[in-house]
Amino acid sequence: MRRSLLGIVVFAALILQVTLFAKIEIFGVRPDGVLIVLVYVALAFGAIVGSVVGFLVGLAQFAIMSTSLASLPLAGTVVGFAVGRYGTKIMFESYLVQLVIIFASVVVFDAINLLWSAPGNFTWSLLRWSLPAAAYTALVGVALVIVLERAFGMRLVT
Amino acid sequence: MRVSWNVLWQKDFPVFVLLAIVSIALMAAGRVAGVNTLSNTLGYVFLPFEVMSSKLESLSLLYQENRALRGRLAEVSRENMALRERVYENDRLTGLLDFKSISPVPLKASRVVAEIDQRLGGGIIVDAGYDAGLARNMAVVSPDGLVGLIVRAGRSISTVKRIIDPGSRVSVCLEPSRVTGILRARSDGLLYVDWVAPDADVQPGDTVVSSGLGSVVPKGILVGEVKSIQEDPSKFSLSLEVGSFVNFKRLEEVFVLIGRPAFGIEPEEIGSPEATR
């Protein structure tokens, strides 16, 4: 993925999140397309780009829809940095590893937001919303990457 | 375990620290003016996509809904005739008793364009903002009953916290007993009226309406009905599970009560920076 395409990819992810991904919920749980893109951007470009993109998508999500989640930019920054710094040190070419990275990213992202917005309901919200959303997002993310890689005949992240 | 301090001197770490500091400053400052501008701009950019998506989804439901509405129309027409008679009777009795007349509250219809993920606090986004007269703390209703309150009004879109979203609280009373309580959504998404006196005369099936206490939600808006009653010996009170009359899964259009409440807390001034905070 080229850096010049980053803006378009992130913008497309935000649009997909408010349109397509918002409609494919299962038991109230939706995949987080923005986090999928953030994880792959951080894996492809490293911690600096990961942090900046994480901050910007968090800010965009905060501006578009949230009322109280001022923690979204911080959560995005932390996830982008952590995946870019540490995710690239492991064998992330494996789909199973990518699955685990996306799952962990959603959990960390939500944990930061829950600690800020609803610490009283932290455990319940994490179990009810975040863990299923993390599993769903991870499955959708890896499935999308496999489909895209088959379609273009190349590895997206190496 | 040895800690490598080299990590601090790698060039990605200062970038991370800088962004983290900006993020924390943002959290401390709340919604600053720059974010409001960004919010309004992004609102304009994303609104067409959200509306298009919402319209596509609603097309598939249109045929089914049309049939149901035709049946409902016949039913409502019959009810309307009966109600008209009641209005005449009510006017006559109100005049006799010299009750204070209550003027109807003006409504602003809005389309639901997006639903906020429960992971991000829940709520819905409607396609009208302070340009259309909406402001924070205005009540939002549907033909079936109370939907929630506006918690943020942007220029062209507003965010509504629904009564089923965690942290939502509404003062309600039960009919016919007129027992009052606080309706709140638990984190499991169910609605409860807590702290009802143990000797209160309540039954499953009792209607729950807004009480008007607190002056944010006007009095008398339908909320739901009592599904079950649970005794809480540790609190010496009853806890009532309430089923909302509104089907939140199929909410496509809502109405915002844009009139000022009769007294007490007023919606914040329309169009002011405070209105979006």
Image: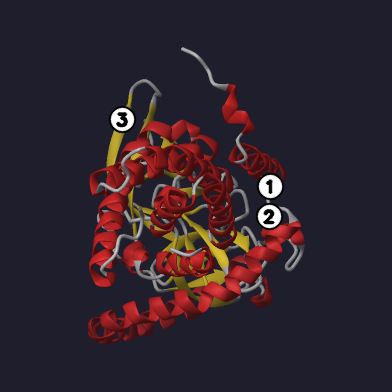
Return the residue at label 3: B231
Residue A32: x and y, percent?
Answer: 38, 55
Q: Quadrant of residue B54?
A: bottom left
The dot on residue B30 is 1
Q: Look at the image and tell me whether residue A96 can be seen.
A: yes
Residue type at the position of mark 3? Glu
Q: Nearer the viewer, residue B36 or B177?
A: B36
Q: Residue at x 60, y 59 (%)?
A: A63
Chain that bears disc 3: B
Q: Quadrant of the C terminus of chain B?
A: bottom right
Give a yes or no on whether discs 2 and 3 share a subunit: yes
Q: Residue at x 51, y 64 (%)?
A: A6
Q: First in sequence, mark 2 or 3: give its number.
A: 3
Q: Residue at x 39, y 59 (%)?
A: A33
Q: Look at the image and tell me whether residue B190 can be seen.
A: no
Q: Residues within 10 Å of mark 2 (few under 14, many from 20)?
A: some
Return the residue at label 2: B277
